[in-house]
Image: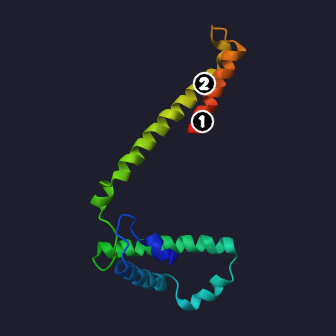
Amino acid sequence: KELVLNSADPLADPQASLFTNIEKEVAAALESVIPRAALGPFVSLSPSEKVTQLCELSNLIIGIRLFNKEIGKGGTSFSSLKELVNHPGRELSDTIKSESLEIVNLCDNYALFFQHIDRINHHYTNEEIKRLKDELTFIRQYL
């Protein structure tokens, strides 16, 4: 079930018939990646190895389903590339990246200031330095 949910398109409507089709596709893809006869060695793996293997299997199954969508033989529920590019979440993601870069640059400027404070021709009081350090701490926490 987890592989079905992971390989479903987050933009698609969750319908029972849709998930049945996805489940069939995932089962076929999973069977092509790891046959039932090979499940014995998988069961004997440690929990961390199982998690690693399941992540890899999930990626392979998504890849197979994307390939099948491309050749017109499956990929039920996957949105088109155009829909993904135009999704409103993309704008939010771009805004977050831009703001993050701005804050990283601000942190770098504070760090440079503290590295070269002894070369600056202005005498800062301990209170001013503490305030600037607190500002840097706040900005890093914000990031």
| Residue 37: percent from left, percent from top | 57, 92
Quarter holding residue 69: bottom left
Instruction: Return the residue nearer the eye: 71 or 77.
Output: 77
Residue at 40% x, 42% y is 95
Provide the residue designation for mark 2: 112
Q: Secondary structure at mark 1?
A: helix
Q: Which mark is residue 120?
A: none
Residue at 54% x, 90% y is 36
Provide the residue designation for mark 1: 140
The amino acid type of the residue labelled 2 equals: Leu
Other residues around mark 2 within 10 Å, as few (<14) / some (14–19) / many (≥20):
few
State left or right for residue 28 relative to residue 109. left
Measured in 3D between alpha carbons, the distance from the residue under mark 1 to the one under mark 2, in whole angstroms, is 15 Å
Residue at 36% x, 47% y is 91
State left or right for residue 103 relative to residue 18. right
The amino acid type of the residue labelled 1 equals: Arg
| Residue 26: percent from left, percent from top | 44, 80
Marks 1 & 2, CB-CB < 8 Å contact? no
Q: Secondary structure at mark 2?
A: helix
Quarter holding residue 25: bottom left
Quarter in which the C terminus is drawn: top right
